[in-house]
Image: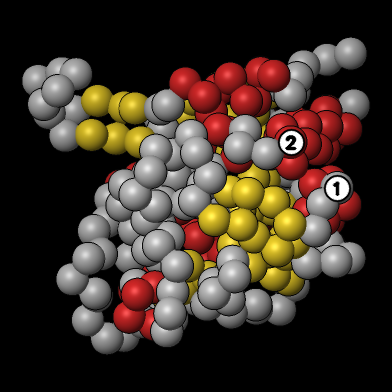
Amino acid sequence: MSIPLIGITLDREEPGGYSRFPWYALRENYCAAVAAAGGLPWPLPHHADLAGAFLERLDGLLITGGDFDVDPALFGDDGAAHPTVKTKQARTAFELAMLRGALDRDLPVLGICGGQQLLHVALGGRLIQHIPDSVPGALAHEQPNPRDEPGHTVEIVAGTRLRVLAGAARIDVNSAHHQAAADAPEGVIVNARAPDGVIEGIEAPDRRFCIGVQWHPEFHISPADARLFEAFVAAARERDR
């Protein structure tokens, strides 16, 4: 059986720390989760002009999270950006090129945290810029405890693909975000919500595999996290046949 090639988007950092020059970054548990699920991890540098060439070779695309935000201009928010919003324009341009190309090819896609938010925008959705200003009584979606521990629970919507593969109606998740999906555009359904009502997951049921989750399943907080990666890689393997 062939091993599906899974593209994983990298973060980019300015000089300092690891190098005196700009450098890419990726937590190793992204790659470990893909490998454990049976995929071949392939980190992707930010070359939007090479998106087509990357996509010709990939069997699945994983859009990762990061300590930055989706530019409100990309989802039609004409007002001023919230003071907390910080962007990485080159990274986002590359990830959008990859996402749009993957969606055009019906390539299996998994979006994680900020990757879920960008996937939502690519599918025609809008975002909440800053949860504490928009959701009365909001939970601490930027959890104070370590990311390898639960931050809150989510309810997984019955009848969704996520519910089937998770095998549970409620799971513990970690949480590290202040933006969130704000709606469910045509072709997209909400598959998970936090207790405060914040959208925690989306999927496009008419596609081969297209799921975004707001938490970080690469930490394997619950058994459902591993099952999500396994289903994603299985969809990529089916495409590879």
Q: Quadrant of the C terminus?
A: top right
As rendered, which of 194 and 74 lies closer to the eye?
194
Task: Identify which amino acid the numbered label 2 is placed on.
Answer: Pro
Residue 22 visible? The answer is yes
Q: Residues within 10 Å of mark 2 (few under 14, many from 20)?
A: some
Compared with 131, 25 (above or below) is above
Q: Viewed as shown, does residue 52 lie left or right of 127?
A: right
Q: Mark number for residue 167?
A: 1
Judged from the image, the secondary structure of the residue bearing numbered disc 2 is helix
Task: Identify which amino acid the numbered label 1 is placed on.
Answer: Gly
Residue at image coords 53%, 45%: 150
Q: Which residue is mark 2?
A: 223
Q: Quadrant of residue 158?
A: bottom right
Compared with 118, 186 (above or below) is below
Proximity of marks 2 and 1: CB atoms separated by less than 8 Å: yes
Q: Quadrant of residue 233?
A: top right
Residue 200 appears at what percent x and percent y?
59, 62
Label 2 vs 1, first from the N-terminus: 1
Q: Quadrant of the N terminus?
A: top right
